[in-house]
Amino acid sequence: METAKTINTVCSDLGVTKADLAKRMGMLPSSLYRKLARESMTFEEFQRCLEVLGVTIEFTLRYPDNSLRSSQVNHVMLLEKMDMLETELEAARKTAEFHKKSLRDLRTELNSAVGYADLGRRHSSQSGEYLEKMQMILTNMELAITYALGETADDEPVLEEPGNLETLEGMRVLLVDDNELNREIMKEILVDHGLIVEEADNGREAVAAVKVKEPGYYHFILMDIEMPVMDGCEAAMRIRKLPNRMRANVPIIALTANACSENRERANRVGMDDFLAKPVNSARLLGSLARLQ
């Protein structure tokens, strides 16, 4: 590129001296003269000169197919292409969010179906066969949904219920979940092991309950993460900020049907003590309570 010739021509046409150009660029005139004389000016420096002078240089581009296109036309086409790609990206994002919501809704329905079957099994031995089939279907669907959502599959083995659960008897649990069926399932597990269960269906109710009861009234809080009115992370954060330390330090266990790393990180940030995926495995639930008492 003949930078010296181009710069000299432009300066002459505009009536600008190279000394003035150097001053506008924050350079010593001698430095600019030397670069022009030696043709050692970089493309970035050359472009900066043109910008200072307010000049746009249009050149011709040759493509692999030997077609020619001016730089200005190419610039306009690239901007149009970028606008089109941004539109397509936004549409793809909305579609992905829609599919994720659909998958999560499906997961919730499957969990509910298994929950009803589990309740039925507790009251009728004939439902055991149906429960086994539904759990197998749930396992297969859960793997598919987890993969589609880009989450990490939980490959931990199913645990046996821990021993020495007698120490949990008489302890009081605040169970916070906007899904009545989920509360019913977990309440039955907890009551069967001698715990006293009180319920709330959103985070705001949970915070209010902790504030109004005497310090130490609740021994544990089981907190769903995704709830209307106030979600579980916000509620946990507010409880941790209560001035009374006995209220603020009550063990809080996060519950969620979306056991992704993002939800785990949020739960950790607000000070939750454990994290359980729904449908809750009774052994993990009781084991968590036993560890935190």
Image (cartoon, helix red, strand yellow):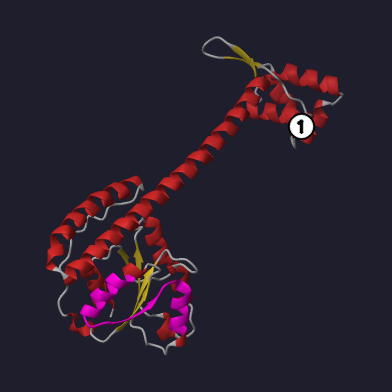
Residue shown at the point (34%, 60%) measured from the top left:
257
Q: Is there any visible trace of residue 243 in the rendered image?
A: yes
50 displayed left or right of 223? right
Badge 1: few (under 14), some or many (20 or more) residues near its Cα, within 10 Å? few
Is residue 84 placed above or below 95 in the rendered structure?
A: above
Foreground residue among 71 and 278: 278
Residue 189 x %, y %:
23, 74
User: Which region shows up in magenta?
Assistant: 183-211
Which of the 4 image quarters holds residue 113?
bottom left
197 displayed left or right of 59? left
Residue 23 x %, y %:
79, 35
Which of the 4 image quarters holds residue 278?
bottom left
Magenta residues, dominant SS class: helix
Q: How many circles with numbers are drawn on the protein?
A: 1
Disc 1 residue type?
Val
Foreground residue among 161 and 60: 161
Is residue 97 placed above or below 163 in the rendered structure?
A: above
Name the residue beneath numbered marker 1.
52
Foreground residue among 279 and 218: 279
The quadrant the C terminus occupies is bottom left
Residue 215 x %, y %:
41, 88
281 displayed left or right of 205? left
Magenta stretch holds residue 200: yes
Magenta stretch holds residue 90: no
